[in-house]
Amino acid sequence: MKANIGISEANSKAVALILNQLISDEQVLFAKTRNYHWNIESPSFMELHKFYEAQYTELAETIDEIAERVRKIGHYAEGRLKDYLKLANLEEGEYTNDQKTQLKNLLDDHETIIRGIRGHISKVEDDHNDIGTADFLTGVLKQHEQWAWMIRAYLK
């Protein structure tokens, strides 16, 4: 049954694409963070191992919330790895176990997501008449700003 929530089919479809691209970026960031959690080698091993775990755990929750938002507006969430890689703006990157390289890569990815979300909020609200998703995206933006701030503290 189609959602009758005051958003046209064309607008909800455009918003679903934005959200599915975000899911894709989140999935790439999740995989990268989990990889770094498994492979960190550093005098700060245990601290970073736990830090990365906290990040990928929160990312998993965010991914689920974004997918549920896609469903709430009447569309299907992407769920295949090959589709994520096609839609994502982020790159998987090369393997590294170097603390500084890992943190810099994660910071770059969080900031890329932040810029992308920031660019979509007014578009979703003004162009696609979806205030709920604009508000939702603001919350996701704040989460990434928090993680970026924490990562920046390690890179000083």
Image (cartoon, grey):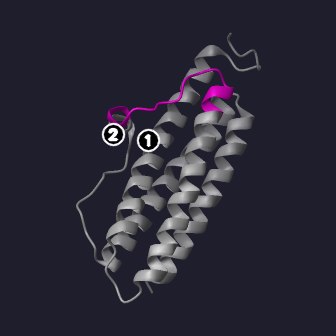
Residue 156 in view, yes or no: yes
Q: Nearer the viewer, residue 43 or 153?
A: 43
Q: Is residue 56 above or below residue 70?
A: below
Point out the image quarter for the N terminus.
top right
Q: Earlier in the sequence, mark 2 or mark 1?
A: 1
Q: Please, which residue is most extreme toward the left here?
A: 94
Image position of 11 (left or right of 28): right
Residue tagged 1 = 24
Q: Please, which residue is most extreme toward the right here?
A: 5
Q: Please, which residue is most extreme toward the top here?
A: 1
Q: Is residue 153 above or below residue 23?
A: below
Please, what is the three-letter code of the amino acid marked with disc 2? Leu
Q: Residues within 10 Å of mark 2 (few under 14, many from 20)?
A: some
Q: To which quarter of the image does residue 130 belong? A: top right
Judged from the image, the secondary structure of the residue bearing numbered disc 1 is: helix
Q: Nearer the viewer, residue 125 or 42?
A: 42
Q: Which residues are magenta?
A: 69-83
Residue tagged 2 = 85
Q: To which quarter of the image does residue 103 belong? A: bottom left
User: Residue 28: x percent and y percent?
Assistant: 39, 49
Q: Is residue 81 above or below residue 119?
A: above
